[in-house]
Amino acid sequence: MINVKDSKVQEVLEIIHEAIIRKEKRGGRLNEEILTEGKIFSVICKDFDMGPRKIVDCMEESYGYDITVDEVIKLLRGAKMGIPGERKEIFKWADRVATSFSKAILGDKKAFEEFDKIRKEPAVNGEKRRVQERVANIIIYEKYPEIDVFEDMERLLSLGNTLARYLFFDIADAICEVYDFPLYKDKEKDKQDHQGKKKIEKAEKQLSHEQALKKVVQLENTLERTDAMLQDLQKEFDVQLEESKSKELAEFFAKLNSEKYGCILDELLVVNKGVDRLRKSNYELPIEINGLLIMVKKLIQFVRDSHIEPIMKVNSVREVVASDIEYCNYDGSPFESPEEKKKIKVISSGWVYKDKDLQISRPKVKEEK
């Protein structure tokens, strides 16, 4: 529990609130997908092992959201959090950040140093994820809801990765400013502008006792960071533009394989395999259907060239536990425990856009009695 009645804590929270408002304005129009992602992250804060089905239930319970398992999976994959183990590592890292923050905001310098150290660490196997600072911000407010004195949670959830990352810097700066801890520097920006860094460090050493000049240094640092943030926002926009193109392609193939259009992708596989079997048995195909077979071959080639691939092999039989088919449409009796094994047969392969790891349609599997 953080004592939000403490005057210095209040000062820190006010600075953070102002930073959130600035970031919200910088973000412009509300992006519903980013907000939904943020709310998914907030419910996972309650259970780091939470899977897509439970997330759906919690989204309904916490936010009244009507969201499907497929939509949750798609959003998690888009955030590079589709693998449960890696997702858990990100949240565990963020939880450590939040714990050290809770002490640092009270003026504990040792805790701040720990906070400063942890927040710069990569969250997953030595790899820094774009989403990790965003998760850290959310878990801080979820774990210590008393600090949300300005009712900023909705604004916080609506910030994308880049804005959340720079808010994360602002949170550290707020503690530095109030308790006069060493000012945080953006290392990436310092590398880009080494001379600027030296100039600021020199100013800090020479003028550390003069409040006005110290403020100038802070403003210079803020200006540099704003410039870096604008560059990062442009990069994020470019990534989002590329991702939107990928999603449009995936949606096109998803429609092709929908029941409305007769599951065309699945049927292409069935027809192709059927023709191959007939040819292997030396069956003479009527010459009248040659044109149709050529069209089927060309369609299959088009699908392959678009990097659309089946996920499972149709008619294959395998033994699975419930977690193995979490992302499949399962027809059969319920699994009574996570360890229970059942034999299933693949009815429909399911399809994935390989380049972006986007699932187009889910495999359909049926229990073998």
Image: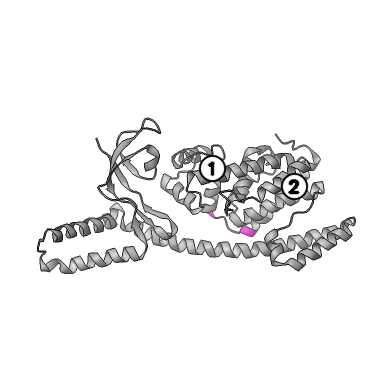
The residue stretch that appears in magenta: 26-31
Residue 40 located left or right of residue 321: right
Residue 62 in the image: x percent, y percent? Answer: 53, 38
Q: Nearer the viewer, residue 130 or 28?
A: 130
User: Label 2 crowding class (10 Å Cα cut-off): few <14, some 14-19, many 20+?
Assistant: some
Residue 106 on image: x %, y %: 76, 40
Q: Residue furthest right?
A: 209
Which residue was labeled with disc 1? Answer: 88
Above/below status of 6 relative to 28: above
Residue 14: assigned label: 2
Magenta stretch holds residue 136: no
SS at mark 2 in the image: helix
Q: Position of residue 139 (x, y in %)?
A: 61, 42
Disc 1 is placed on an element classified as helix
The residue lying at 87 percent from left, 56 percent from top is: 208
Identify the mark nearer the N-term, 2 or 1: 2
Frontmost residue, 336 versus 313? 313
Q: Residue at x 22, y 55 (%)?
A: 270
Give the dominant element type of the magenta stretch: helix, strand or loop: loop
Label drawn at residue 228: none
Side of 73 relative to 177 (left or right): left
Which quadrant of the structure image shows residue 255? bottom left
**Foreground of the two, 356 or 150:** 356
What amino acid is found at the position of numbered circle 1 in the picture? Answer: Lys
